[in-house]
Amino acid sequence: MATSTTEVADPAAKARDIEKDLKAAVRGGGLSLVDEPTRDERGCVVGYLLQPLSQNGPDPVDATITSLNDDGWGGERRTQVNGMRRVTLTKEGWTLRVRDYSAQRAKRGFVALLATKASCKQS
């Protein structure tokens, strides 16, 4: 896959695009930001810690995932481990991991989204 000139000139440009995708899906899904987004200076990671805005109505995690699917995120894989729902999606060399702790009262209903760029080396 070819690298765009924008991505070469500004390696964090795609990370900002990914962040916009996530923000739009989160807002539309009914989740609220708990803390500042996680980012790294290399443009390799974008993450959010969230909580559902309401306990009533449609599942905000499913609504967020549906919005991400509509925006081109695919390859969905779902698992359930000890009451934690995990969903993995991919888009343009990025992997998004969604961890839904809303069924675990000890975790205070948090939802974590972490997108990582596949081409970044671990430091």
Image (tube, rainbow, N blue to C red):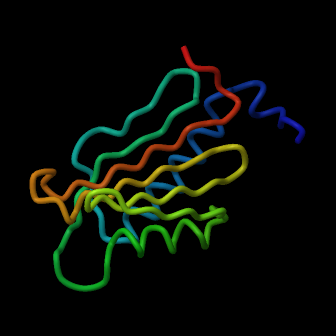
Q: Position of residue 27 (x, y in %)?
A: 37, 65
Toward the viewer: 55 or 14?
55
Q: Quadrant of the N terminus?
A: top right
Q: Position of residue 10 (x, y in %)?
A: 69, 26
Q: Quadrant of residue 77?
A: bottom right
Q: Position of residue 59 (x, y in %)?
A: 31, 77
Q: Quadrant of the C terminus?
A: top right
Q: Quadrant of residue 71?
A: bottom right
Which residue, as the protein is rendered here, is positioned at the far front?
82
- Residue under the image location 24 percent in, 41 percent down: 35
Q: Is residue 70 left or right of residue 109?
A: right
Count up the numbered dots: 0
Toward the viewer: 44 or 103?
103
- Residue under the image location 36 percent in, 39 percent down: 37
Toward the viewer: 91 or 19?
91
- Residue under the image location 53 percent in, 50 percent down: 96
- Residue under the image location 18 percent in, 83 percent down: 56
Q: Quadrant of residue 23?
A: bottom left
